[in-house]
Image (cartoon, helix red, strand yellow):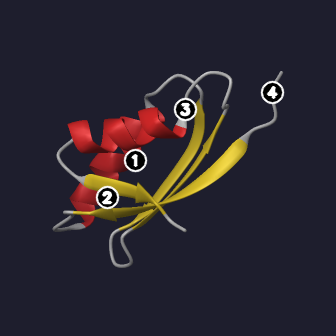
Amino acid sequence: MADLKTVHLTTTGMHCGSCAMLIDMTLGDLEGVSEVKTDYASGATMVTFDPERISVDDLVQSVRSAGYEAAVTA
């Protein structure tokens, strides 16, 4: 079993708390994702995932497919 990794994303395009909830549900449904927390006020999303099952690029693309923008926080 792989070690889980955590990535922090800057997520933009949210207009309310429901947007953050949608991002959490979208990412949380992905195979290999174990935890997601999105904060609407700060535009921050934290994702804990198994890098052997899903990539950071896949996470970002999933947020984009839900209608928002995401980038890895430096």
Q: Earlier in the sequence, mark 4 or mark 1?
A: 4
* Amino acid found under the numbered disc labelled 4: Ala
Depth check: give the residue in front, 52 or 39: 52
Depth check: give the residue in front, 33 or 55: 55
Q: Please tell me whether mark 1 sits on a helix, a strand or a loop.
A: helix
Q: Please give the residue where the numbered disc 4 appears in the rendered image.
A: 2
* Amino acid found under the numbered disc labelled 3: Ser
* Amino acid found under the numbered disc labelled 2: Ala
| Distance of label 2 from label 4 (alpha carbons) | 28 Å
Q: Earlier in the sequence, mark 2 or mark 4?
A: 4
Q: Nearer the viewer, mark 2 or mark 4?
A: 4
Give residue 34's position: percent from left, percent from top.
62, 37
Residue contact between numbered discs 2 and 4, judged by CB atoms under 8 Å:
no
Residue contact between numbered discs 2 and 1, judged by CB atoms under 8 Å:
yes
* Amino acid found under the numbered disc labelled 1: Asp
Q: Earlier in the sequence, mark 1 or mark 3?
A: 1
* 58 left or right, relative to 33: left
Residue 55: image tag? 3
